[in-house]
Amino acid sequence: MRQWRMPVPSRVIQVAVPRPLHAVYDYHVPETLPMPGIGTRVKVPFARSTTVGICVSDVVENPHKTLKDVESVLDTAPIVPAELMELAHWMSNYYHYPLGEILATVLPAAARRGATCSINPPDHWRVCTEAFENTRARAQAALFDDLRERGPTATADLLAAGHSRASLNNLSKGDYIERCEPADTPASETPPTPTEAQETAIREISAALQSFAPFLLEGVTGSGKTEVYLRSIAPVVEQRQQVLVLVPEIALTPQTLSRFQRRFANVGMLHSNLGDSARLQTWLKCARGDISVLIGTRSAVFTPFKALGLVIVDEEHDSSYKQGDGLRYSARDLAIKRAQSRKVPVVLGSATPSLESLYNANLGRYQKLDLPYRAGNAQMPSYRVIDMRGLKHTDGISVPLERVIRDHLRAKGQVLVFLNRRGFAPTLLCAACGWQAHCSDCDARLTLHKNPSHLVCHHCSLKFQVPKTCEGCGGNGLMAVGLGTQRTETGLQNLFSDVPVYRIDRDTTRTNAKLEAQFAKVNQGDPCIMVGTQMLAKGHHFPNVTLVAVLNADAGFASADFRAPERTAQLIVQVAGRAGREQRPGQVWIQSYQPENILLQRLINEGYPGFAAAELAEREKNGFPPMHSMALLRAESAQGQEAMELLNQLKAQLSGVEIMGPVPAPLARIANRNRYQLMLLAPRRTQLHAALRRLKIPKVPYTLRWSIDIDPYDSL
Ligand code: ADP
Ligand code: ZN
Ligand code: ZN
């Protein structure tokens, strides 16, 4: 009789390591170690050192003959849950990127380095007995009484109040006090009554809970999209499920956070300024289900959730959702992917949706929800165009604009002046010989900055001294040409010396805290002028701004990038949306040297929806995204020769797709490296990916950098 034996489980696993290689590696797990499950971190020897990798398979068909041993298993349970593991595999396929590096991106930095993944004990304290009666321990008694009075209090606050760590320890040892979570501040806000349009949107979203349902919420600026989010979140949280809210980088301000905290308990936050350990803690708490609502920027899309119930992507058109280097993922697209695999609704909200999302809505893939009017009593702002041809201006402010600004300030309104360029002037030019200050390392002009005076390259960040005389002819004809926010700030200060002028750009506002401080001053409500870059365009609510001035609308529409018109229109509409958000109606004045520009005219006359429809038709005609799929192969090297050669080699292998290039990138040299690109287009996603998968990338020296960008946002 034949004997059936249980198959001996093999002790071989596959490990993905964070190295730029596509392969995963087989390792043997010694008997002394527990068998790690898929998604568990393991420490393994790799290339004469050790690294932290992730177990990605425990069924290895034909293991490699000579196997190295796993050194240690770092987790008792998988840290990457099955859903995220599946997402990582999908990304590896879609973005043509090594699985090990994808998993390294998914994990918080601390976990990637091998830190222990456990949730810190809560750092608040509360009393847990009736009384403390040891009258001789005076310090402990004082702490006990104080704590009973205060309720849950953070360790740091108790120490700051003069209590000692010794007292804390002693009381805790005697079971008089215990650790606890901070007390939840109960909802402290009466929400406004939803408008009819809000009501419809909330109803549709709520009806779709527990199933995959993508929504595109197109709501004009100030229409109350956030209120729709908040009310859609409420029933999810009540069901003890969790919500992921993605917001653009610049929009995650304390103002945003507190709007959610006033409504819900256990709100968590993830953004790029968070320390590694805090980031890991939040990650773990989401996985355990401790956090109900997680608000985060791009990389928060990789957070594990115990019971995800709803995903929201606010300002879904925002460029900060697309990672610009390394693993060039789109957090918006991944958010949809996650909602799909967790079978929950996803809401993409914007006043100016991306053409991608509008196209999907047109095809019926997304359900469209509209908020066509502003909430409360606010009216949409009105647009005017100032024909700048032949007009005089003071540091960018034309005479008619100066008059309007004065009118608004006199009527106690606030004014926002938008100019998308930092510094004093974008060009330093010699009037005698035409010499211009260029960066030594880039094909780019240097921007003049003042206070202190220097020339800065906005591409590689190099700084240079301002030459006293022209470097071309030695003469004294140097002059600052063109406008930056610094120059306009000075101009505005001279013209309107009796009101404060606040400049808001990356130079004045390096941190969110600084930005908040500036906005706090503005929101005291007195007449003032803000001048700044796109930082001012994003989601902020300034109740008293009645005038928005766009100093130069032309540059954006003229750019070579196929997305430039879309981006420019979004920017103008968003910045215009800061005007008249409460009782007083707002005006938008746009200065232009090409006032009859068809794109500008269309935007003003037909609004963003009309503009977007025309732009979509244009993209269709040209075979561009979103109808066709695009990938950009980039390569750069010191001389450029090797980069060009690599792209030509790759081109020779490609078939079944439309190929453009290789050509020098529009900014051909940055930081002394010459850049080339090859653009691929295909009517179907699958064609593009099939072609890319067939590519055999030759071995290249490490001095030659190359990348594949799927669905590129920037083609410059
Ligand atoms: P959006 O995100 O669409 O630009 P917000 O959500 O910031 O708009 O809302 C703009 C303003 O309108 C906020 O001050 C908000 O409190 C208010 N608001 C929202 N919904 C209503 C409503 N139904 N009734 C009155 N005010 C509302
Ligand atoms: Zn000169
Ligand atoms: Zn430079």
Image (spheres, rainbow, N blue to C red):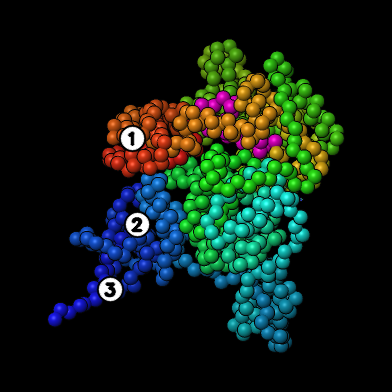
The kind of residue on which mark 3 rests is Glu
The local secondary structure at tag 3 comes to loop
Residue 23 within the segment the image draws in magenta: no
Label whose residue precedes the other's in the sequence (1 or 2): 2
- Which label belongs to residue 16? 2
Q: Quadrant of residue 382?
A: top right
The local secondary structure at tag 1 comes to loop
The kind of residue on which mark 2 rests is Ala
Question: Where is the N terminus found, in terms of image quarters?
Answer: bottom left
Does the image show residue 594?
Answer: yes
Residue 572, given in percent of the width and then of the height, sits at 65, 33
Residue located beneath label 1 in the image:
656
Query: In front: 244, or 218?
Result: 218
Name the residue rendered at 58%, 45% in the picture. 316
Distance CA(mark 1)–CA(mark 3)? 50 Å
Label whose residue precedes the other's in the sequence (1 or 3): 3
Residue 446, given in percent of the width and then of the height, sits at 55, 27
The kind of residue on which mark 1 rests is Gly
Residue 701, given in percent of the width and then of the height, sits at 30, 38
Distance CA(mark 1)–CA(mark 2)? 32 Å
Q: Nearer the viewer, mark 1 or mark 2?
A: 1
Give the answer, above or below, for where 513 lies relative to 9.
Answer: above
Residue located beneath label 3 in the image:
31
Distance CA(mark 3)–CA(mark 2)? 21 Å
